[in-house]
Image: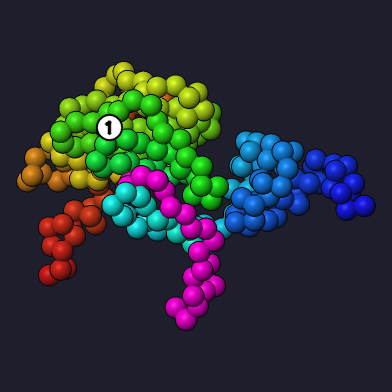
Amino acid sequence: MKQNFFKYLPSEILTDILLRLPLDDIATCKCVCKPWLNLIETDYFNKSHLSKSSPALVVSMLTTNSNWFNVFKLNEKLTHKHKQYSINMFDFPQATKIQGSANGLLLLKNPFRNHLYVCNPITREFVELSGRLTRPREDCYGIGVSRISGQHKVVYFNSKYGECHVYTLESGSTWRRVKGAIPSSDRCLSSVGAFASGNLYWLVSNGWKKFPYVCCFDLETECFSTFPVPLKFIADKVNPKGI
């Protein structure tokens, strides 16, 4: 009776049930059967579950030949007396550093071979991006989601040489060089791009004595823009102790 019940359960009801499960249980449900796997991997399910999921924190411990990742569920109700238990833990087969995150995906870079990976820390699945991009200095990276198309894009940006390349995950293609005006600067103060509202942001500077500014990349239009940093940031740089 139980097998027949789940077998003939309408897909919309099954989807509603699975959407109520926490992240760690979703990873287990993918292994139950192919219909559940196909349902969980749909864009609708991912977007719906992501909107309801609690935020999580990924902690990486770099070792010689690999990375240990711990995924913690953040709970505002917990105090310093409560222990935070990880909802997932796994060993990534390469020594990498986190170069950004978006929609639960991590952008990882092997600092020794300059290989890039996109990893899902809940399902432990990852893909290696074909092709390598690197310069002697000022390499910047980022991952984000475009506002309209919803495509996941990995961006390589080098402020010193004024070049930018984009890798669209959904298309599975290679790197594309961005055409148009690309801002150049002497230094990239933040190598990891901050993702917010469909844009990636890096902190860059022209010269050691000049104030930095923000370089913004729109993931939908793939165009750059720049704007000054907030005045509070400049004040803290000039007078860090508030004297």
* Residue at the (51%, 28%) spot, across then down: 170
- Tell me where residue 61 appears, x and y as whole percent: 35, 58
Q: Which residues are magenta?
A: 74-98
Toward the viewer: 70 or 160? 70
* Residue at the (24%, 25%) spot, across then down: 163
Toward the viewer: 172 or 152? 172
- Residue at disc 1, secondary structure: strand
- Tell me where residue 198 appears, x and y as whole percent: 45, 37
- Tell me where residue 168 appears, x and y as whole percent: 45, 27
- Residue 129 visible in image: yes
Q: Pick out the residue farthest to the bottom.
A: 81
Residue 103 in the figure: left or right of residue 191: right
- Label 1 amino acid? Phe
Q: Which residue is mark 1?
A: 157
* Residue at the (31%, 32%) spot, across then down: 156
* Residue at the (32%, 20%) spot, across then down: 177
Toward the viewer: 213 or 167? 167
Q: Pick out the residue farthest to the front.
A: 65
